[in-house]
Amino acid sequence: MKNKAITILFTLGLATIINSTNALAESAPTLHSEPQQVQFQHIRNATSKLTYGDTTFLIDPMLAKKDTYSGFAGTYRSEIRIPMIDLPMSAKAVIDNVDAVIVTHTHLDHWDDAAQSVIPKTMPLFVQNEEDANTIRAQGFKDVRVLGIKTQFNGISLTKTGGQHGTDEMYAIPELAKLLGEAMGVVLQADNYSTVYFVGDTIWRNEVENALNEFKPEVVVLNTGDARLDGLEGSIIMGEQDTLRTIKHAPQANIVAVHMDTVNHAALTRKELREFVQEEGIEKQVLIPEDGESLKL
């Protein structure tokens, strides 16, 4: 009888412990098992703002007013002045609350005189190599950093990725290869936030495919303007078919298509891309924001 009583008391005590543990588990704060949203704002062309929590990056700022510059010589529709449209807000509003700038390369449509004049010279800037770093330091900027693998900023990792700003045939022409130069992509990662991959000014390459496979980003920003040069086949950046390729290699990702309707040599418009993605039935996965539009991703 005594042993039976002990058994009953032990069972009741064990049940009490289990119930208490369950109650504590229910009252404990839930850790984020799914990535929190990041905020993406498309400004114009390839210029974007990306916010992780309290940290905001400005990517590839081209901040000049409409018609400030001549069109790019030797490219499609070079007679058209650029930018072809105005900013959706003032340049000062673009840089409000920005903590750092990422310049994928120093072509005019990614880093222009207007951006150089309005961005504070003490702002941290991330670039692809020492050549670009020296160029931007010579413009008076004091805190220019070259990206590598998991370069840290405010608890956010930034990793440089590769690509090629045109076809092999274009790069076989020395003068043209020098003009096209190098351009990088960048992957941004932070704990409990979606991974974002800015592919940059590149055509589809193994480097892009490898980055998609390695990082498995939830958000992929594609420069899809299908920019063209005179007298040469092929593009120097992505086009409509590359949205399909990206979905094939990153079915988990939202694709954000930018770099359209602003510079003369971009042959693909947002209207045309919207029609294409609807025909292909991928409109829910390919987002084509208007200038100034914000997305939570």
Image (cartoon, rainbow, N blue to C red):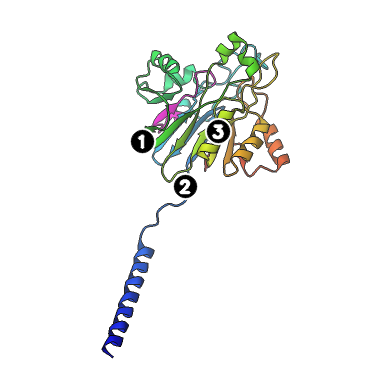
Camera-near label (2 vs 3) is 3
- Assess whether residue 103 is covered by the magenta stretch: yes
What residue is disc 3 on? 210
Q: Nearer the viewer, residue 297 or 161?
A: 161
**Which label's residue is closer to the chain start, 2 or 3?**
2
Q: Quadrant of the N terminus?
A: bottom left
Query: Does residue 202 appear left or right of residue 157 in this picture?
Result: right
> Where residue 11 sits: x, y (%)?
33, 79
Mark 2 near mark 3, Cβ–Cβ under 8 Å?
Answer: no
What residue is disc 1 on? 154
| Residue under the image location 73 percent in, 40 percent down | 279
> Is 107 located above or below residue 278 in the figure?
above
C-alpha separation, residue under disc 1 versus residue under disc 2: 18 Å
| Residue under the image location 31 percent in, 87 percent down | 4
Name the quadrant containing residue 159.
top left
**Which label's residue is closer to the chain start, 1 or 3?**
1
Mark 1 Cα within 10 Å, few/some/many (few <14, many 20+)?
few
Q: Main secondary structure of the magenta part?
A: loop
What residue is disc 2 on? 35
Disc 1 marks which amino acid?
A: Asn
Secondary structure under tag 1 reads loop
Instruction: State which region is magenta.
Output: 93-109
Query: Does residue 75 appear left or right of residue 211 in this picture?
Result: right
C-alpha separation, residue under disc 2 versus residue under disc 3: 22 Å
Disc 2 marks which amino acid?
A: Pro
> Where residue 263 sits: x, y (%)?
61, 21
- Assess whether residue 62 is covered by the magenta stretch: no
Disc 3 marks which amino acid?
A: Asn
